[in-house]
Image (cartoon, rainbow, N blue to C red):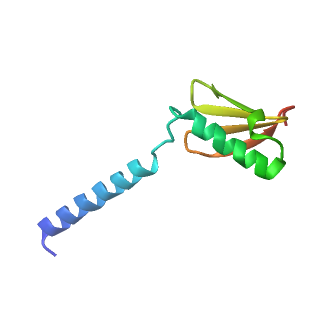
């Protein structure tokens, strides 16, 4: 294989890898926190019962975590969209 083809292919592979990594690290913006709170409230109503209007949310940890409390259950939503459920009394 000619050296120029090998170098060109290697550069394209590295650029594709960097592009995939960059796209995979995209975070969920909290500018529209209302949509996130409504989604968590819907999840809470489906799993725990209750009323969606009982849920309240706020930013925590310098805006890296959105906390939503519905009754006695607290949900933490990070910027990657992962939800952690914690009882309000702690672990």
Q: Nearer the viewer, residue 18 or 56?
A: 56
Q: Nearer the viewer, residue 14 or 57?
A: 57
**Number of numbered callouts drawn:** 0
Using residue 41 as the reference point, say whether residue 82 is left or right of it: left
Quarter residue 33 falls in: top right
Quarter residue 76 falls in: top right
Using residue 5 as the reference point, say whether residue 16 is left or right of it: right
Residue 15 in picture, x, y percent from top left: 28, 55
**Residue at the location (55% across, 44% down)?**
80
**Residue at the location (57% across, 23% down)?**
62
Q: Residue furthest top?
A: 62
Q: Quadrant of the C terminus?
A: top right
Q: Is residue 61 visible?
A: yes
Q: Is residue 78 visible?
A: no
Residue 88 in picture, x, y percent from top left: 83, 33
Q: Residue furthest bottom?
A: 1
**Residue at the location (40% across, 50% down)?**
23
Q: Nearer the viewer, residue 4 or 31?
A: 31
Using residue 91 as the reference point, say whether residue 53 is left or right of it: left
**Residue at the location (38% across, 55% down)?**
20
Residue 28 in picture, x, y percent from top left: 51, 41
Quarter residue 10 falls in: bottom left
Q: Taking 89 as reference, is 27 above or below it?
A: below
Residue 40 in picture, x, y percent from top left: 68, 43
Q: Nearer the viewer, residue 23 or 17?
A: 23
Q: Taking 45 as reference, is 65 above or below it?
A: above
Q: Quadrant of the N terminus?
A: bottom left
């Amino acid at each position: 294989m000619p050296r120029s083809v090998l170098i060109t292919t290697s550069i394209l592979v590295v650029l594709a890898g960097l592009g995939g990594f960059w796209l995979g690290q995209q975070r969920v913006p909290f500018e529209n926190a209302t949509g996130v709170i409504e989604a968590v409230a819907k999840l809470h109503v489906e799993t725990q019962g209750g009323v969606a209007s009982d849920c309240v949310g706020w930013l925590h940890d310098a805006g890296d975590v959105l906390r939503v409390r519905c009754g006695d259950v607290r949900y933490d939503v990070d910027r990657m969209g992962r939800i952690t459920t914690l009882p309000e009394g702690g672990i």
